[in-house]
Amino acid sequence: MFGAGGGTSSYEEIENTDLIVLWGSNARETHPIFFHHVLKGIRKGARLVVVDPRRTTSAQWADLWLGIDVGSDIALSNTMAREIIAAGRNQLLRSTLPGLGADVVMEAVGVPETFELCTEMVRPGGHVANIGVHGKAATLHLESLWIKDVTITTGLVDTSSTPRLLDLVRRLSGSERDAARTHLVSLFELVGNQDDRVAKARTALANALF
């Protein structure tokens, strides 16, 4: 046996929460014991949201199934972060922080509100890593940060491994390449209707979560 399994939520939390989100997880088939506790939560009144391109067996139990297009996960996650902040629910994030704050906080959304939230959540001496692509100015609140001795770094995710990955794909035979490929999506499908996808995702999530 290599490694050990683990979950981000306890069975008790799943059974007594108001909302359960399965994102890219078909727990009905892959984690049947955990899904048993999901069903207990549903019977107690919890709403289930399933995010998956496929209408899985887990999605059959969902109040809302978001059958998003392949490659649109980032747009959806950014939408969720924006809606949480816009609805004033970010106090929940702060309440989960240990002690003086988090050692490392990553900003990956690229909007002023999330950057400012990250600088509020980092502990003295901590690190804020900004990897989001910003299109608007964000305020750096030095009136509260000057005493905290935090480090703020910027930059996109490193793509140094891309040449190696492409070389591995080139070495595959035709049949091996077909077997390894799960989806074939055109560039237009990925980026052509991004604004429309974000609008639809925001509407669906606002209705489901709030």
Image: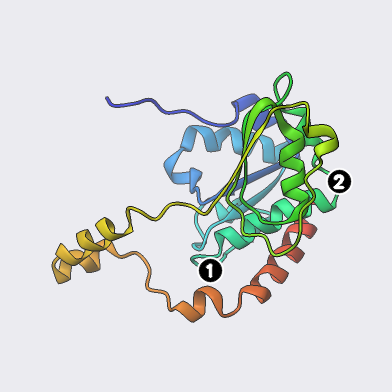
Q: Looking at the image, which is closer to me, 35 or 20?
A: 20
Question: Badge 1: how crowded within 10 Å, few (<14), some, or many (20+)?
Answer: some
Q: CA distance from mark 2 to mark 1?
A: 28 Å
Find disc 1 in the rendering and name its residue.
Answer: 69
Q: Residue at x 73, y 38 (%)?
A: 119
Element at badge 1?
Answer: loop
Q: Position of residue 157 (x, y in %)?
A: 48, 52
- Examine the rendered structure and indicate whether residue 164 appears above or below residue 197: above
Residue 164 figure quarter? bottom left
Q: Residue at x 63, y 54 (%)?
A: 77
Q: Are marks 2 and 1 in contact (CB under 8 Å)?
A: no
**Which residue occupies 16% across, 69% down?**
175
Q: Earlier in the sequence, mark 2 or mark 1?
A: 1
Q: Quadrant of the N terminus?
A: top left
Q: Nearer the viewer, residue 145 or 79?
A: 145
Q: How many marks?
A: 2
Amino acid type shown at disc 2: Gly
Looking at the image, is mark 2 or mark 1 nearer the viewer?
A: 2
Q: Residue furthest top?
A: 99
Residue 94 position within the rendered picture, expressed as x and y whole percent measured from the top left: 77, 32
Q: Is residue 46 left or right of residue 61?
A: right
- The percent position of residue 10, horizontal first and vertical second, equals 60, 26
Q: Quadrant of residue 129?
A: top right
| Relative to 132, 83 lies left or right | right
Q: Secondary structure at mark 2?
A: loop
Where residue 33 appears, as percent x and y from the top left, is 49, 32
Toward which corner of the image does residue 186 lie, by quadrant?
A: bottom left
Q: In the rendered structure, find residue 88 and report the number of the disc placed on it.
A: 2
| Of residues 129 and 170, the one drawn nearer to the viewer in this rendering | 129
Which label sits on residue 167? none
Binning the other alpha carbons within 10 Å of mark 2 as few (below 14), some (14 to 19) or many (20 upward) gives: few
Callout 1 amino acid: Asp
